[in-house]
Amino acid sequence: MDHASHFEREVRAFQAAARQAADTGGAPLVPSCPGWSVADLVLHLGGVHRAVTSVIRDRLDKSPDPSDLSFAALPPDLTGWPAPEQAPNLGPIPAGLLDWFADGAAGLGAQFRANDPGTHAWTWSAEQTVGFWLRMQTIEAAVHRWDAESAVGTARPIHEEIAADAIGQTFEVMAPARRAWRQAPGGAGERFRFRRTDGAGCWTVHFDGDDVRLTVGDKLLAVGDDERITGGEDVRSGVGGLDVEVAGTASDLMLFLWQRIPADGLDVRGDREALDRYFVLVPPV
């Protein structure tokens, strides 16, 4: 999968949606990001891009100091820019904000192109590589592109390669991290299967105490403690042995796991109440 190309394409699509929002003379609310407008979304994603660029370019050993915003390269005149403490900021969206976003996204894309994915870089995860940021920011760009398009019209599905990658990343990276950040309750053996209907792909996740164990095909990944164990479980057809199975396109499964769409449009088999408990085990950030 060419993450860098996907990142650049998703960022361009995000910019197009943001400029469409700006053309309305305001900053539409983002339905999938309660409390944010498109202006707030642009500022958020642009800030993330600048922070990650600084981490990679400057070889930082931690996240940039939030009390020193020099990494963000903000212009001296912020008239009309969204103020995070006043969200939702309803616009109008200043042209300078959109230009600042475009420059920051291009800078991060250049860092991804210039550095091997295996190059060491600080991250908030166990994986300390540029490749972690490339994967993470490709997914985030796609999700927020969907958010921005939803605010101005009908959002296009997530590209199937990004979506399938994001489903695995949800359980390999995000679920253990979110559980730790929010001190989620221990798992009691719950098993959820997410089955793709528009291509190959089946992910079974097992919550056992503090561990999050992901089965993809016949490979068991014990993600909670960073172990990688081959074998151990077979992916079976149907709901046998599971609390619930959720089937849908890769895009819809990803958007559900990232809490962008409800389960109503998916094929849910088994214990629907167990599926509702999923978001207790993996709380939002």
Image: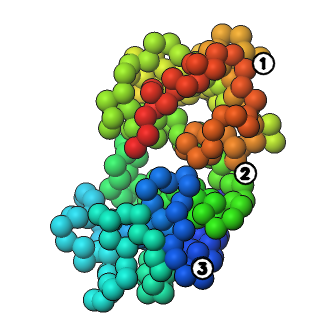
Viewer-proximal residue, 116 or 213?
A: 213
Give the class, few, some or many, for how many residues have Cα within 10 Å of label 2's Cα (few <14, many ≥20): some
> What residue is shown with label 1?
237
Q: In the rendered structure, are the residues bearing label 2 and label 1 in contact, judged by CB atoms less than 8 Å apart?
A: no
Residue drawn at (51%, 72%), measured in percent from left and top?
27
Of 4 and 258, which appears nearest the observer? Answer: 258
Residue 40 lies, in percent from the top left, at: 43, 67
Between 219 and 33, the one lying in front of the other is 33
Q: Outermost residue toward the bottom? A: 77
The C terminus lies in quadrant: top left
Q: Which residue is mark 3?
A: 24
In this picture, is 190 found above or below 170?
above
Whether residue 70 appears in this view of the structure is yes
Residue at image position (62%, 72%) is 17
Residue beneath label 2, please?
A: 160
Q: Position of residue 6 (x, y in %)?
A: 64, 64
